[in-house]
Amino acid sequence: MSMSNHTVKEARPPAGLPSVSTEVRVRHFLKLLTSYWVSSDWVFAWFGTAFLLGSKYIVIYLSVQANSWQHYFYDVVQNKQVDLFLPQVIKFFLINGCSAVAIVLDLYFYGMFSLRWRTVLTTEYVARWMKNNGFYSMERAALIDNPDQRIAEDIKDFTNSVMAIVVGIFGSITAGISFGSVLWSAAAPIRFLIAGYHISIPGDMLWYSLLYTALTTGAIILVGRPLISRTMRQQQVEADFRFGLIYIRRNAEQIAFLNAAPAEVQSLRAAFDHVRKNYHRLILAQMGINATQHAFDGVGQVLPLFLAIPRYFAGTLTFGGVMAAKDAFSRMTSSLSFFYQAFQSFAQQIANVNRIWAFDQVLERKGATDIEIIRDGGDTISTRGLRLDFHDNASLAIGDWTILPGQRWVVVGPSGIGKSSTMRAIAGLWPDGAGVVHVPSQGLTMFVPQRLYLPIGTLKNAICFPGSPERYDDEQVISLLSVVGLEKHATRLHESRPWTDQLSPGEQQRLALVRILLYRPDRLVLDEATSALDMANALHFYTTLLERLPSVTLISVVHDERLTPFHTHCLRLAADGATQATLPPKEETVC
């Protein structure tokens, strides 16, 4: 049920979004990346960025101090300077303790930064998704797969990882410069002969570390190229499999009645087979990356020793200098190798950003409608030249239709002709077609579909939804439960349950009448709101409704012609158009 004065997952193929250039996607990424710094939380965003970059710099500074400590410590050991040993031990614990504090603070602050960034983005995307019932049109038109995953998981992964990548790049460059200077001071020139000319390039260990990192990065990128597409595919097949499980939960009773568990097992196996096969491809891609990285890591462990030890043997470098050079080489290559070590994270974020981009495109497109909805200050619902278009190229002409205050219209027609679609058009939920729908902006218009929406929570909250349960006292709600024959649930008013699963379809439709009588709408649209009731309860539904709300303006889609006498007018839908009639009062009239 929805109300006009309230702002009103399943996996499917994407809607065929237009292909765009890399430049457009990059602009979208930059907009997504920078949106937090101009949001309502901009003060914390800028302060947090400065703190994270500053703490990263402090950690690197302490790492440089630890490298310098290694130089002096091993020289003290080599020279057997006992009197200097204890001060070096104390210095080690000071450096190590400060590093631990800096890292812990960095981790905590990074977690808070990611959480607040996620909060801003999630709030924005949820608002855009829900705006003007856009979530409904997106689902109805199957515009995109799994919008829930894009909000709940893709945004979470984006905010958790992207700042780590940004800070990691900053740290990589800062550490590269810091430890590069250490390597430069400990390096010898590279000498070689070209065309009779003696060439000498200073800083051999620095250049070798850069070459080593470049070769490693290039190899990892080459081997890991398939990872991006396979990661995107894995997100989709995992979501499809998860939705299959959720769908079975939603329809557990129907599946059990049909004894259809074996068929559903086959369906789940087929969905999981896609998960398994693509995950195997991911494993192979990751194997290639890991093997390449392991091979280069092994070389990186001994390469600085091979370069520094000859100078130690020649007496131009102390043992402490060798250990400091090895440590600086390892730290520098480790910092620069951030780019290939984070390749999987890059791949994941490219996949996330692509999915968020696709979601953004649909959010921009979803509001388009060919049927104009005009909300005016009158009290009459009317249509002008209304035509509904359907996906099978069929259409239904409603034409001009006016529902005056106090009139009660019944909408009839063969199954599948478009009765429910007509109700959706009045609610502003049917975008395909032509014409104008005028709906009053004053008073309350309530729409009651065949399946009542009951949010998870207390029974009273479900009955009073979407309003606050505090607006109605318990006695009032209990009294209405008795009116519709649900007094047995009066003691459960404050129990929290998934009431859609707890109540039968017939009980839910009787609960809809309780909600109607609580809100007392000026205009009421019922779309087969008694389809799950036996005739006695259906007659009681309409009798009670009109006794308690005698002046309500009513539009009903009914499933049984015996409910027709509760109405004053009839709209009959047919393939060649709609016809209108006034019904004789208080008679068993078939429309």
Image: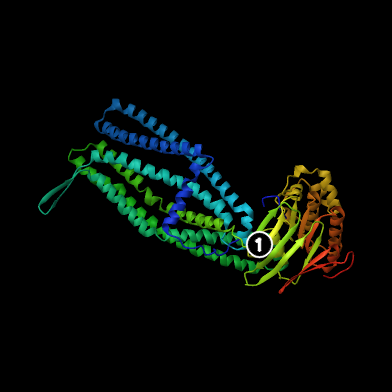
Looking at the image, residue 410 sits to the left or right of residue 54; the answer is right
Q: Is residue 307 above or below residue 410?
A: above
The quarter of the image holding the N terminus is bottom right
Q: Residue at x 32, y 51 (%)?
A: 298
Residue 524: percent from the left, percent from the top? 77, 56
Q: Is residue 463 above or below residue 525?
A: above
Q: Residue at x 50, y 39 (%)?
A: 42
Looking at the image, residue 211 sits to the left or right of residue 193; the answer is right
The extreme right residue here reads 586
The extreme top residue here reads 83
Q: Secondary structure at mark 1?
A: loop
Looking at the image, residue 257 sits to the left or right of residue 366; the answer is right
The one nearer the camera, 542 or 166, is 542
User: What scheme was used to colour the molecule?
Assistant: rainbow
Which amino acid type corresponds to the residue marked 1 in the rendered image? Answer: Trp
The one nearer the camera, 150 or 205, is 150
The one nearer the camera, 582 or 472, is 582
Decide if residue 347 is in sight here: no
Residue 559: percent from the left, percent from the top? 79, 67
Q: Residue at x 57, y 56 (%)?
A: 147
Residue 264: percent from the left, percent from the top? 64, 67
Residue 489: percent from the left, percent from the top? 81, 51
Decide if residue 64 is in sight here: yes
Crowd tier of the residue under label 1, counting other residues whose Cα lies within 10 Å: few below 14, some 14–19, many 20 or above: many
Mark 1 lies on residue: 430
The quarter of the image holding the C terminus is bottom right
Looking at the image, residue 306 sits to the left or right of residue 48; the answer is left
